[in-house]
Image (cartoon, helix red, strand yellow):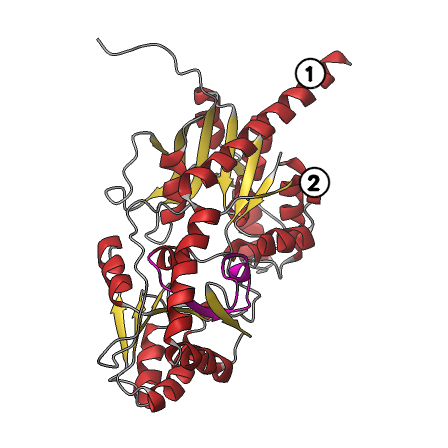
Amino acid sequence: MPDETPDPRPHVISLCGTYLKPEMQSIYRQIVGLSRVRTTVYAQWLENEAMFPFPAITKLIKLHHRPKGNFLKRFWYKYVIKQWPPPVEINKFIGPCHPWDLIDKLAADKPDLVHAYYGHKAVGYLPMLTEWGGPFVVSFHGVDVAKDMDQPEHVAAMQEVFARAEFVMARSQSLLERVAQIGCPREKLRLNRTPIPMDHLQAVVRTPPANGEWRLVQACRLIAKKGLFTALEAMQEVVKHHPKAKYLLCGTGPQEAKLREEIEKRGLTANVELLGWLSQEQLLAEYKRAHLFLHPSEMTKDSDQEGIPNSMLEAMATGLPVVATQHGGIPEAVTSGSDGLLVPEKSPADLAAAILQLLADPAQLVALSTEAARSVRENFEASAQVAKMEDVYFEALAQARARAAAAAAK
């Protein structure tokens, strides 16, 4: 007979918009890595379940408002005075007042805590979480410190999230600082670094290729903040000195067509390859063949910035030294001159100079490679980072209990 003993661990809801997009590997690692709490995933949309298997996933149901029109007012405005659309609301809405059945799900499952992934999603969930009344925490991951921040009403709603959440987590110190600037009280901020499983990542010290075919790899979505066009301009200079050098770009995204045009325009078709989306196994094979990892991230016009790129951390764990920018959370993972080289954002000349410096110095290549593998294991190993997130959960639960006890004593 199956063991019917109740699980004594606190029950945490992992609340996602989509479970899960391919680039959300780190969220999956957090969910499956939990040990001191049990979790049920709630998601509005389900994707890639075969890629991210988990036994406890609940799909939220979309609730629809039903309009009930006022026929007389509609006739008056549309046909008598011919003022359409009307200057006042002529419909009444009946039915549910929330867009998803989140409250019903929470009432049925009676969790101890909710973890809302992504700050901008928490804004949408806030009215439902407030009506539910239980404690929740929120985590920021990068794009959510920029999305809709030009809209005052969104910023005000975000500040309400900060006021009601027990704690607010972010993947890097730079993201925490940005969240504080938006209005989160600093005493609520908690660091929640990306968890990287490393047992399967073999570290290999990188040495120069005997045939001169340097392989520089970058793995990311093809979007503005990844600095891809800066990298192409830098490669134009690199291939003047190393004509066999290759820049391997792993990923897909909205800039792909423009990148292909730019590659041809700059005469780099023999030196730049767009490999598309790769499985984890395929990506690790590219890392194994590579000599450097590039990640020249840059702030976009709408202030979108990096946390600490997961792909960069995995690359470091395999022994790839990094050439990247002094951007977002990258300097929290890469110490320039120790495990990589960092240059200013949006500077193709500085990026090219750093690449060429490393290609010309075998001793530095070996030193940075060795330290990259060591430092990333010390600071980002998965089980330690998931345990720290669980610490935040327990701190949130203790704080909520203390608040409830104080209210009851009044």
184 w.r.t. 81: above or below = above
Q: Of 361 and 301, which appears nearest the observer?
A: 361
Q: Which residue is located at x 67 percent, y 53 percent?
A: 182
Secondary structure beneath dot 1 equals: helix
Q: Is residue 123 left or right of residue 41?
A: right
Q: Residue 239 at what x, y percent from top left?
A: 33, 87
Q: Is residue 223 left or right of residue 409?
A: left
Q: Which residue is located at x 39 percent, y 56 percent?
A: 373
330 w.r.t. 198: above or below = below
Q: Is residue 135 visible?
A: yes
Q: Residue 153 at what x, y percent from top left?
A: 65, 53
Residue 374 falls inside the magenta stretch:
no
Which residue is tagged 1? 405
Residue 222: which quarter of the image?
bottom left
Mark 2 → mark 1, Cα distance in angstroms: 21 Å
The first of marks 2 and 1 along the sequence is: 2
Most distant residue in the front direction:
363
Three-letter amino acid code of the residue under disc 2: Glu
Q: Which residue is located at x 30 percent, y 80 percent?
A: 260
Q: Of 3 and 248, which appears nearest the observer?
A: 248
Most distant residue in the right direction:
410
Q: Residue 238 at what x, y percent from top left?
A: 37, 85
Q: Residue 366 at what x, y percent from top left?
A: 37, 67
Q: Is residue 115 left or right of residue 382?
A: right
Q: Is residue 315 left or right of residue 161?
A: left
Three-letter amino acid code of the residue under disc 1: Ala
Residue 408: which quarter of the image?
top right
Q: Of 175 and 202, which appears nearest the observer?
A: 202
Could you say which disc has been placed on residue 187 in the image? Answer: 2
Q: Quarter holding the C terminus?
A: top right
Residue 319 falls inside the magenta stretch:
yes
Q: Which residues are magenta?
A: 318-336
